[in-house]
Image (cartoon, rainbow, N blue to C red):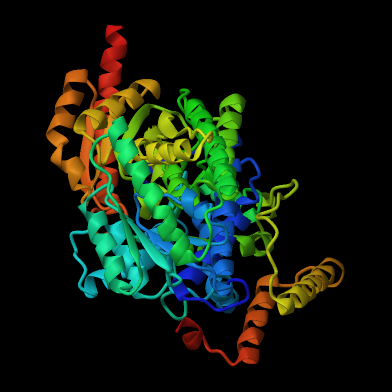
Amino acid sequence: MPILGKKRKQEWETVWKTLSDLKMLFAGDQEELALNALMQNIQNFIREQFQKADAGKPAIWYNIGYGPPLIYALGDVNNVPLAEMSALCSIIGDQADTEALIDASEAAGYSAECCSADKAGIGAVVKGLYPDPCCIVGINTPCDSQVAAFQAMAELRNKVPVFPIDVPPYDDDRTLKYIAGQLAEMIPFLEKNTGRKMDWDRLKEVCQTVNRTSEYLWQWMEWRSLSPTLQPSKLCAFTMVLVIALLGSPLGENIARGLAEDARKKAQEGAKYFDEKVRAIWYQDPVWWDIQLYDWMEAELGLVIPMDIFGFYASEAWIDIASKDSILFGLARLLVNCGPMSRQFRGTMKRYIGDFMYLHQRFQADCGIMAGHIACKHAWGGIGLFKEACKKAGIPLLIFEFDMFDSRILTRKELQFELKRFTNEIVIPQKARLARKS
Amino acid sequence: MACRARKKLRKGPQMSYFKSQQELEQVIGGFLRIFPKMEPLMREAIGHKKMALKLELSDPDLTAEIDFTRSPLEIRFKTKAEGAIALTTTADHFHRLLLGILPIGPGVNHKQILIRGSVANLMSGVALFYLAPTIYPFFLESIGRKDLILPGKRPPLHGEKILEDKMTKIVSPLAFLLGYALGLLKKHLAKNLDIVAALESMGKGLISATGQSLEESKS
């Protein structure tokens, strides 16, 4: 299916057609505000990307841990997250395309041990799916795979200038000032390579959009914390997509508003489509290669995910727009303390475990599910401490190994078996025992 | 045979439309068996994708696979094959889906229908269920089961299709007129007109005009 009247690469055309079909399918259900907002605004984002690329506007590539607010402030610049095609092909395209991109990256000699999000992204670069960049921003969060992905982007476009951002594994004021300093240094770099001047008034507007988006996401979390949670579990992780690709744009704000309004409406109307039996905090990575699995969990097991680590949006996201310094400090804090890529995956195990305990309590959960993406070695490194903390708190914890973008590592059947066994044989009996005691 | 997932899907408040497995196999199974007759139209609907769609129905149980990887397309029953994509639901919901009373979007959102597989393939596969409500009532009539055609207004099965292509904008109203004329003919002149045979002929016409054999369309 052509995009903007032009033939494009097969992977893009598949995503575009599927997105159009999905929109048409769910438009039959106007109650689904969140799904419709997601699909509409993601499609608008892709449309804008192609419009900018067709018009020869400069493009900036960046890897997972970074976000686009500073890029939006430059005006008509194309922001291209490296993992964009990894996510799009899996969530709203053909999973076979994601796996073909992963294979293309490995066949081109990039490390098989890297994260599949990056491997598929590198595969997309190898296959020429992204517009050529005028410069590249690389960040070292959350993991070594990001450093490798940054190196791969730089190597694949070796004449393109690169800007590295170093995030230490801390979250104190000294760290935030250090990162704010790097962002300040990055502005002239971006200006030089894009040929656009940083417009501080526009940056203020972008930050106000970020603040409004943050408010919607906090409201969304509040509605989802109610039991039973009536908004589908599968929507939980989409905050991450928003933060990486759309934060600071009206499209991102529309998605956050859609998520919040949908959660509020569902909670107030109370329409139940299944019996909620168990509430779990999904920690680590979502099953991007099979979003429908969450529907199965709800219908078959009564297992609901009120919040996961990708959906959790911490309260440190507010940006004070009073001065240039406060803006940069706010953006640095957003980068370090808000999303999982820096906050939990880069930070200390104390914070990783502390956030889990907080989510467990706030979202009235019965258990935890540590969906161990094989490349998230930082999480695997602290698994002993996490298990011990859960044991001490009496929280049942399921741990399994899988790959969030590659269905060949752990199959759907194996995953279903683990989830079914854990829910029916461990959590439900424990809940019953606790209920009898009380 | 039915897995627990299917047993737990929400059932509607009404009494079951199918009293036995035999009746279900006669009606739904019979309907699936006419698919090969309409193969060209079916392949057009799914965008000529090579894939197998697994159906898992419960209360009563029926499993079937519509295999578009084979030419001519094959319908297999009681199969344990996984299928590239799958649709799991109760027999009643499926019946309502085929009649166009339960649109697939809300059916999925309300957990009445579970789907599995690549989203791109699923979106191609669901197009079969946009086509089904125009054929299924005629099929029921042809097997003497008019009693299963439920009364009531049919909700829109999907949102407005974006007709980007100029030719599609012209052809769509023409196709509607053709269908309308066929309907008038059946209502006023030939009450026993076989709609499935008409669609079969339409499919043959499609192949003859495009010069595209099924083998070619597959590749």
Q: Give the quadrant of the C terminus of chain A.
A: top left
| Residue pictured at 61% horizontal, 31% vertical | A265
Residue farthest along the top direction in this orientation? A438
Rendering coords of residue A422 (x, y %):
25, 34
Q: Residue at x 47, y 87 (%)?
A: B215
Question: Which is more toward the observer, A25 or A274?
Answer: A25
Which residue is located at x 73 percent, y 47 percent? B151
Could you say where residue B142 lies in the image, as x and y percent from the top left?
67, 64
Q: Which residue is drawn at 31% across and 45% down?
A: A285
State which quadrant residue A362 falls in. top left
Q: Count of labels shown?
A: 0
Provide residue A20's location: percent of width, then percent of height. Answer: 59, 62
Residue in the foreground of this view, choosing between B165 and A5: A5
**Residue A393 occupies quadrant:** top left
| Residue A373 horizontal side relative to residue A239, left or right | left
Residue ranking furthest to the right: B188
Work out whether residue B203 can be spotted: yes
Indicate the quadrant where residue B7 lies. Answer: top left
Does residue A312 appear left or right of residue A400 in this picture? right
Can residue A171 be seen? no
Quadrant in which the N terminus of chain A appears = bottom right
Question: In front here: A136 or B206?
Answer: A136
**A281 and A172: which one is in front?**
A172
Q: Residue lying furthest bottom in this view?
A: B211
Q: Is residue B163 above or below residue B11?
A: below
Position in image of residue A146 (x %, y %) = 26, 55
Q: In this view, does A127 lie above or below B103?
A: below
